[in-house]
Structure formats: structure tokens, C-alpha cells
Image (cartoon, rainbow, N blue to C red):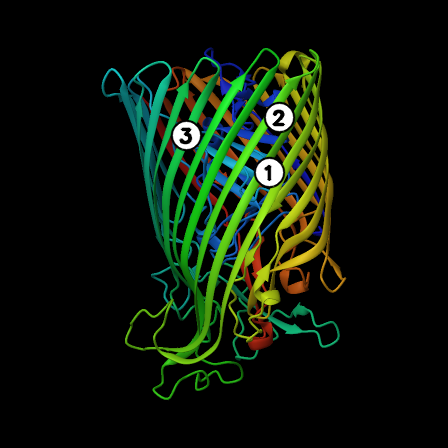
Amino acid sequence: MRSSSKIVISYLLVFLYSSAGNSALLEEIVVTAQKREQNIQDVGIAITAFTGEQMRTLGYTNAQQITALAPGVHTVQPNGEANYGLAIRGAANSDFTANQESPVSLYVDEVYISQMSGAGFMLFDMERVEILRGPQGTLYGRNATGGLAHYVTKKPEREFGGYGQVTVGEYDQVKFEGAATGGLSDTLSGRISVSTHHNSGYVTNRLDPDNDLNNANDYAGRVQLLFEPSEDVSLLLNGRYSLQQIRTGFFENVDAVVDPVTGLVVKTPGAGNFTGYTDSDGDVFAGDYDRLGFNDLETYGMSGTLKWSFDAATLTGITDFQSVERDYLEDSDAAPFNDFNFYLTTDAEQFSQELRLNGETERTQWVAGFYYLEIDINDSNGGEFAFLGGDPSGSVGLDENGNVTGFDSPYQQDKKSWSLFGQVEYELTEQVRLIGGFRWIDENVEFDYDNNFVSYPNDGTVARGGNPNVIATFGTYSGEYDKGLWSAKVEVDYRYSDDLLLYASWNRGVKGGGFNALFDSTLEPLTDANVGFPEDKVDAFEEGFKATLLDGLTILNTSVFLNDYKDFQAFDVLGLVTKVLSAPDAKNTGFEVELFTSPTENLDFIFGVGYVDNEITLPTGAKTQSVQTPKWNLSGLARYQWPALNGNMAVQGDFHYRSEHFHALTRSDGVTENGYHVANARLSWASRDEKWEVAVFANNITDEEYIVQSFDSLTVFFGMVEEYYGRPRWVGGSVLYNF
């Protein structure tokens, strides 16, 4: 499927065991997409929502797996298991440098997550996730030109309870998650949640069989205290921590050449490359990696949420601090030679403060607020070159002492942003509701960058990010972006009946400008035009309806959209230069359909279909398509349950399909995924009191081989393409106990 289009199909919704254990019931989902609690069917926004129970039943273990059954939503993994993002309706950023914020925002408990390197967090003890498609700049503000995903965790409760779940599976997988909650005093309750995940890795390193790659070694925990001195006041304190230490270097080495006529990369499997090495065994989950890559990632954060209800309004204050530290290295050449190893370091701290008032009158609901964000980044990227083409012995690319040479590019970025926002909903008649919103944003970004040619000592000294062994400095850059921005919304809702909502909206979204932290081995001039890029603006028009049919047994939601961009921020890789390009124009048009139906009390079906036509006009005038934007996306789920063994048995299968799409704007053969489908299956038994559940599962049951990310940037140097594949078939089982 071409990136020029994208249709999205998805399914939404919900099944729960009834108390009798014989039927699956359609469950009402309450969302906070408009900063207040509403039934999902009453909100004129294209939303896919999953409850925590659904996510657990579907086997989702990290924050990015939710895309499988969400319309128009796709996972972006520029560094495999080490870096994540989301793409919605053609808005995507697969830049792996940490100073770029995604056009699809991530929130956890109303707190913005700016770092893509910290976005692959484990899902455990979750209340729900809400995925909002289309610009959400009025109420959420932070760059949400494509949409956003909001993860909501379970909160402390007065009554003692909790759960524990153990999962085991292939590749020596052992995963545990659990939580406990209860009252600590008359006014204080607490909740502690933990998760660990270990497996030995699913990519074989033929040079080091004891250290398979893409393993799991993850730990995460969350502690919450809820203080409720009265019915009108509550204070929630949240502390969280996560640690990941995994082996990376996962790319499949595929021979390739640059077509001298078109200048595009063409894969030539088995033909050999410049180094004399060819990986021709046909196993995409095995390679000869001479350098053991790694991703050491540590995140932590603290937040406080105050809610104070008055007679006429409710005041909400959310204060948050978070930190992300990462040291990442990969064997980029994916060969037994020490040719090229790429690395990233991240040291980011973020502080945010939101204050808002919610109120309502007989015919009006309103919200107004202030938001402040500060992000301080001290990062780097670089690469070690043992040779620069044509000499597998490694004699080129070494200094006079025999040390490996390469590029080290440290950079610092300080971002400060404040905004004022408001939205009003007015009930014109019993059937017609008007919604208007506006947000003013003041954004300032200061950026400093150095491009150094350095030597890396052979004594094991870590010299990533500010390497002192500088052979030559090829350039420095300092820049500042300081601008006032705005976003807005106008919407009309028509409530035809209690079971049918029709809506039409215009949203003006904006994503602030910034700077490219170039991995600049080609010595591109460090000018404002090459390093900086302006703000991204979009006028988004959407129409849709949400219908509840057949006495609540069927839900049908549709949306049709047109997104018209100016100065579209498009990610690209040119040689070894990774950067965001400012494209003068881009247009995305399409539709999404979601259907859930229960033809009998024991049987559920979920289907989704979507489409998007995407076209980007580059500064040269050439037309192309956005990365990670398939034209068609289909998904579905079937579930049947029946009483058995003094409980309930359930069998379910789900699938998703993505048509042809691209991983770079060139759309060359080297960055093309021709389309794929992934199917999963699950069999479970739950006791009647729902305290116990035992399940077995098979993810990617057909063992489909599909490319998640590819780079053709090394072809001109080494005659190869890097390809990263999604996980192979994975079989396992789990035991859950609720108390």
C-alpha cells in the first residue's frame, strides 16, 4: 500500500463476562477526551478505547501494541525494541534522536510524555487507554496534530484488593505483574503496582550464541497515595520508575545497490556487498554481529494531582517531573566486521504544570486552563567507523594509534512553553450542541550542536556524547526558535436520537518548529535552512456518526476526514543524515469504520476498515508519501465463550492487516514493506467468581515475517540495507488471580 493513502479499519469495543457466565455483554466505556467524563458514544471525536481487561485479554504487554486494532493508528519503531512512537492519519515521525517530539502525543494519567525513548513502557494495572484521532490541540496542545493516546492507570481504592499474574512463553519468557490496594487510614488509601519481564531474545547471534538479541530485561513499578480529606477535595501522589537493559543490534543485512539511473536503492539478496559479506541463509532472525549492542534505559517520575470542587466549578492542578536516561548502541552494519556502530545517548528532564477549571450551567459545559512545560535535553548521537568502504581489514577509519574513529555529535536543547486554553459547549436545542475552543501557545527553543570527528579508545573507556578525543571539529551550530502559536476548534453535534450522534468539526492544529540533531557524517552545512524547521500547521475537517443499534447489541462508528497541512514536518534519511524536512504542503483524506456486534449472548465480533490517501509536496516540488502510512488497514476479532468446568471457557482470534507502506520518503525498494497480516489466538478459562483465569495464547500464529523498519542509508557505503523484523510466532500461557 502506498503511503499516499491510508485507510484505516479498526475495531473498538468491549466484552465482559456476565455474572451468569453465559454471555458477553457490551460494556459502556467512559472517556475523558474533553477533560470531563463522558460516554464514548457521546463524544464527537473519532476515538478507540480499550479497558484494562481488554488489553490484558488481548495480550498487550507494552504501550505500543494498542495500534493493532485501532483504526488509522500504527506503531513506529525506528530503533526496534528500544524506541517507540505512534502514527495516525499520515502524521508520523520515525526520527530516532530524542529531541524531536512526535506529532502523535502520549499521555499517562494526563501527564505528557515527550521522549520517544521512554514511550515503550510496559502496560500493567491499567484502567483504560483512549486513542483520539485527528488534531487535539485545543485541550491537549502538545503537538497533537495527528492525535494522541492517553493511558489511564488504576487508582487507589478504599477496599483491600489486587491481583497477580504470571506469564511464561517461548524464548524463556517469564513475566509478572501485580498490584495491591486498600485504605491506610480514614482519609488515605494507597496502591502499589509492579511488573517484570524477562526473555532470552529471539534474534540469534551466530558469533555469540549465548547472547541472543532483542531480549527482555525490564522492571517497572508505581506507587500511588490518594488523600481525601473531604468529599470536595482529593490529592493523588504518584511515583513511578522503570529500568530496561536489553541487547540490541537486530538488523538483517540485505545486499543492495544504488540504481545509477534513478538514484534509488534496489535490494539484491545474495549478490554480495562491498565488504565481501553476504547473509544468505534466509533466516531473518539470525545474523553475524561482532559488536553486542545494548539499550540501557532508566526513567522515573513524580506527579501530584489536586482536585477541588466548588459550587460552580472544579479546580484541577497537575504537577509533574520526569527524567529519561538512555545509552544505546547497535551493530548497524549487521556483519562480522567492525564497520559501523551507531549510538544515541539521552539525558532529559521534564517539568510540567497544568491548572484548569471545569464548570457547567443548565445548557453549558466549559473548561479553561493554563499549561507550562519545560524540557531540558543533553543528548548526543554518533557512530564508530572502523573502515569507510572498500577495506574490510579496517585499516581505513583508524587513527595513528589504531583506535577506531567516527563522529560524535553532542547537543543541548532547552524548551519552554506556556499556553492558555478554553473550550465551551453550548446546548442550542435538545438535539443540537455547538462546541468552540481556542489555545494560545508561546514556545521558545534554544539549541546548541557540535559535529566532531573523534577517536574511540580501545581500553574500554566510554566516550559517547562529548568525546574528548577530538581529531577535528567540522561544525557547530546555535539557534533559537521563539514564536507564538495557536490552535482552535469548532464543532456541531446533532443528537438525532438517544442512539445516534452525528457530528462535523474543524480543528486547527499546530506543532512547534525546532532543530535537527543531525548525524552528519556527510558534513552537510550547518545552516538555519538545514538544521532548523518551522512549525507544522493543519486544518482538519471531519464528519462522522456514532450509532448504537439493535437494542445495544451493535455499535457502528464512522468518520470521514480531510487534513490540509502547511509546512508539514516529514522525517527522512538522506545518506547518513537523519532530519525533519519542512514540506510546503501535505494532504491526507480518508475514512474509518468501526463495528462491534454480539449476534448471540456468547458471541462477539469486531471489525474495522479504514482508508487514507496521503500526498506530500517536497521543497523540490516532487510528490511523495509519509512514512509508516499504509493505504489500507484492516482488523477484526471474534470471541466465543461458554460455561464449562464451573466457570467460563472463551476462545478468541484477532488479526490486523497493513497494505504496502514505506519507511523513508524516497519510497525505494530498500525501504518498502509490501504489506502483511498478523493473527493471534487465545483460549482461556475463568472461574465463576472471576478470581482465577488460566489462558494459553499464540501471537503471530502463522509466523508471518514482516518488516517493521528499514534503512537504505548505508547502501552507498557498504552495499547493504538494514531491515528490522517484527516478532516471530510466540506461544505461551498465563495464570491470573484476583483478590
Mark 1 near mark 2, Cβ–Cβ under 8 Å?
no
Q: Residue at x 57, y 26 (%)?
A: 13
Q: Nearer the viewer, mark 1 or mark 3?
A: 3
| Residue at the image position 53 percent from the left and 84 percent from the top | 390
Q: Residue at x 58, y 55 (%)?
A: 707
Left or right: where does residue 28 sit relative to residue 629?
A: left
**Secondary structure of the residue carrying numbered label 1:** strand
| Residue 636 at x, y percent in the picture | 62, 33
Residue 699 image offset from top left, x and y in percent: 50, 41
Q: Nearer the viewer, residue 572 or 356?
A: 356
The disc, 1 or 2, on the residue closer to the chain's N-terminal end is: 2
The CA distance from mark 1 to mark 2 is: 12 Å
Please name the residue that numbered disc 2 is placed on: 605
**Crowding near pointer 2: few (<14 within 10 Å), some, many (20+)?**
many
Q: Which label sits on residue 655? A: 1
Q: Which residue is mark 3?
A: 317
Q: Is residue 302 above or below residue 429?
A: below
Q: Is residue 278 left or right of residue 315?
A: right
Question: Where, quadrant-wise, is the C terminus in this rendering?
Answer: top left
Q: Quadrant of residue 589?
A: top right
State the separation of the CA atoms marked 3 and 2.
41 Å
Name the quadrant containing residue 228: top left
Q: Are marks 3 and 2 in contact (CB under 8 Å)?
A: no
Q: Nearer the viewer, mark 3 or mark 2?
A: 3
